[in-house]
Image (cartoon, rainbow, N blue to C red):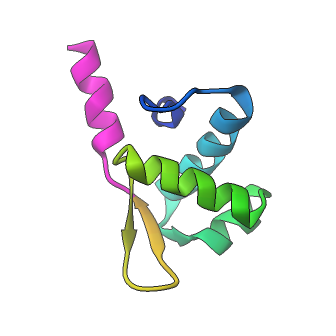
Amino acid sequence: HPKAFLSMKRNIRPGLTARTRIILLLEKEVSSAKTIAKKAKLSYAVVLHHLHLLETENILARKNKRPYLWELTGAGQQRLINVHS
């Protein structure tokens, strides 16, 4: 998934795969880290790590109070549009 690439971190295959799975789930619905971990079949710690990386890159944002709900911001797509312009 194009949004899985990070500009401030190294992009290695396992991380890209995990972020792609997370992003694909979040494209369908806003979810908590626990729900994402279950549906993506990833550990909670891995999901939380990648959610924070994606949040740092402004690809995701947290909603509400704990347990946080995570949603896509659209910034990742905007970054891709600017690169191709």
Q: Position of residue 73 (x, y in %)?
A: 32, 53
Name the dominant secondary structure of the magenta segment: helix
Q: Position of residue 50 (x, y in %)?
A: 58, 50
Q: Report whether 25 appears left or right of 75.
A: right
The N terminus, quarter of image: top right
**Residue drawn at x 53%, y 70% as measured from the top left:** 31
Which residue in the rendered view is the most extreme toward the top?
85
Start and end of the magenta stretch?
72-85
Q: Nearer the viewer, residue 46 or 1?
A: 46
Quarter where residue 37 is shown = bottom right
Is the residue 46 above or below the residue 15 in the image?
below
Q: Report whether 38 appears left or right of 60.
A: right
The C terminus, quarter of image: top left
Q: Please say whether residue 75 is one of the residues in the magenta stretch.
A: yes
**Residue drawn at x 53%, y 56% as measured from the top left:** 51
**Residue drawn at x 68%, y 44% as measured from the top left:** 18
Q: Position of residue 61 (x, y in %)?
A: 37, 61
